[in-house]
Amino acid sequence: MVFDAIAAAQSRDADVVIADTAGRLHTHTNLMEELSKVRRVAEKRLDGAPHESLIVIDATTGQNGLRQAQAFAQAVELTGVVLTKLDGTAKGGIALAIASELDLPVKLIGVGEGLEDLRPFDPNDFAEALVGD
Ligand SMILES: Nc1nc2c(ncn2[C@@H]2O[C@H](COP(=O)(O)OP(=O)(O)OP(=O)(O)O)[C@@H](O)[C@H]2O)c(=O)[nH]1
Ligand SMILES: [Mg+2]
């Protein structure tokens, strides 16, 4: 499917293809293998693809988020993290563990359910919200 999507995008001269994979538990080996396959298929259709592989982590996730990110990083060579649900009470401290253990940057944050609520990550804002000013 990602193969066809890239082909269609190329024939329409599109700049970006976003492949949104279905959520899965990192403990499900066959589904993690499927994820690696999506990556290999994209690579086969277009040199250098996928240019980004982002894992979406809910800010309310505790230490399990680190294990999730580790397993996903092994399956698909992650390039970054999207940290969602920062509009709730969770401050997203798990991002620190992921950044230090896996050397992965947070690239986007989610602060609500609207399209405009997906925003670039600002390290200063994040640090202030985490420890207070
Ligand atoms: N408040 C808030 N809600 C969010 C945020 N991000 C996602 N949601 C909501 O959480 C719910 C699940 O979001 P999805 O984007 O469907 O989650 P998903 O991980 O793609 O789920 P699957 O594709 O089923 O694995 C939806 O109701 C979203 O609107 C966020 O940053 N803040
Ligand atoms: Mg989804």
Image: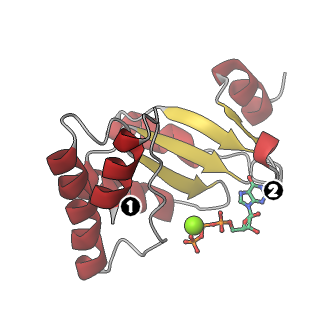
26 and 50: which one is in front?
A: 50
Q: Quadrant of the N terminus?
A: bottom left
Location of ligand 1 given as a quarter of the image: bottom right
Question: Is label 1 in a helix, a strand or a loop?
Answer: helix
Q: Which amino acid does label 1 sit on?
A: Arg
Colour scheme shown: secondary structure
Which residue does the numbered mark 2 point to in the structure image? 113
| Left or right, residue 62 beside residue 54 | right
**Up-down relation of residue 123 to residue 66 (above or below):** above
The CA distance from mark 2 to mark 1 is 26 Å
Q: Does the numbered disc 1 mark a residue whose Cβ is under 8 Å from ligand 1?
A: no
Q: Does the numbered disc 2 mark a residue whose Cβ is under 8 Å from ligand 1?
A: yes
Give the x, y percent position of residue 39. 25, 54
Q: Which residue is drawn at 67% across and 51% down?
A: 84
Q: Quadrant of the C terminus?
A: top right
Which residue does the numbered mark 1 point to in the structure image? 67
Give the x, y percent position of residue 18. 48, 48
Q: Earlier in the sequence, mark 2 or mark 1?
A: 1
The residue carrying pointer 2 sits among few (fewer than 14), some (14 to 19) or many (20 or more) residues within 10 Å by Cα, namely: few
Q: Residue at x 65, y 46 (%)?
A: 92
Question: Is label 2 in a helix, a strand or a loop?
Answer: loop
The residue carrying pointer 1 sits among few (fewer than 14), some (14 to 19) or many (20 or more) residues within 10 Å by Cα, namely: some
| Left or right, residue 98 beside residue 102 | right
**Residue reaching furthest to the front:** 11
97 and 19: which one is in front?
A: 19
**Up-down relation of residue 23 to residue 83 (above or below):** below
Q: Where on the picture, by quarter, is residue 121?
A: top right
Q: Which residue is drawn at 20% across and 48% down?
A: 45
59 and 50: which one is in front?
A: 50
Q: What residue type is labelled 2?
A: Glu
Q: Which residue is drawn at 75% across and 24% down?
A: 125
